[in-house]
Amino acid sequence: MKSTVLKILILLSVPIILILVYSVEAEFDCEHEYHPDFCDTIPPAHYIGIDTVLDSEQVFVFIDNLEIPQRALRDTIYYYTGFSLSYAEEFEQAHWVAYVHCRAKQARVASRTNTFLVDTSISTGSATHADYRGSGYDRGHLAPAGDMTWSATAMRESFYYSNMSPQLPQLNRGTWKTLEEKVRFWVSEFDTIYIVTGPVLLSGLPTIGKNNVAVPDYYYKVVLKYSSNYQDGIGFIMPNSIDIEKDIMLYAVSIDSVESCTGITFFPGLPESVQKKIKKNTCIAHWN
């Protein structure tokens, strides 16, 4: 497997147009199952031919709750002004955070507060200030504060500890922040997009604090554009590492790959034919 990935990366470095065909499922015969080592072996997305021309006359198609993913176990979903989440008590953070972003929500009504809050709506209790204090990890937003400037309430709620996960500064203030900024750029370009993000939660992770907040090895983000005549999606899996690269596109993968890594089904409300097309896509030309 490693040799196959190495060959692909070498080919991608050659400055010519390459058509690469690679199937994750060929080596991982799994559908939404956990694979602890899978995140180390997912091949990056790549540039292959553009098969659709973006059209300025596209009309956004709204599907109610399309951003809400599904897991094998039934989730208790918590709804906030700007996002929704499923809370993982075992790991003291969210399995996922989901929301819809659009140009209208890029209005700057509220400023960043930096006031982190215990989330009293979580029935089992959320993490606290003390859990992160002195740990060496940032309180990394899953739904970014920068996407909540359209509402003072949404901004305040984005600082709940239920929306935080322990991220190394190199990730949180570096490549992860760059990805969040890129998503906002896509909103300005495409208007409305669906976003789901979260940590890759597996048993045996190290923890911080009295509440045993798990420290993930990886984080994911999936983005969907769904309009009347154009649909596209992209995924990212980033390591929680001091050695993380700056180029976010090095961590771009298919949504199928993120599903295999997390055990989560994204955008289940899409028509099946659209799901198959979008989730297997590894072309990043439209996103870069």
Image (spheres, rainbow, N blue to C red):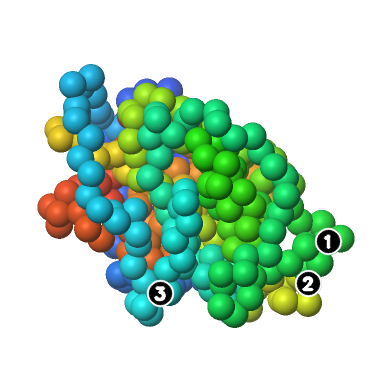
> Mark 1 falls on what kind of element?
loop
Left/right placement of residue 185 relative to residue 117 reads left
Sort mark 3 into few (<14), some (14-19) or many (20+) by Cα contacts within 10 Å.
some
Q: Amino acid at mark 1?
A: Arg
Pointer 1: what residue?
Answer: 133
Helix, strand, or loop for circle 2?
Answer: loop
Amino acid type of disc 2? Gly
Give the mark, 2 or 1, whose residue is nearer the N terminus. 1
Q: Which mark is residue 75?
A: 3
Q: Is residue 48 above or below residue 100?
A: above
How many residues crowd around disc 2 within 10 Å: few (fewer than 14), some, or many (20 or more)?
A: some
- On screen, 41 above or below 179? below
Q: Is residue 181 left or right of residue 130?
A: left
Q: Are marks 2 and 1 in contact (CB under 8 Å)?
A: yes
Q: Quadrant of the N terminus?
A: bottom left
Separation (CA) of disc 2 from disc 3: 25 Å
In this view, the residue in front, 119 or 273, is: 119
> Can you identify the residue that label 2 sits on?
209
Under mark 3, the amino acid is Asp
Relative image position of residue 224 (x, y in whole percent) = 32, 44
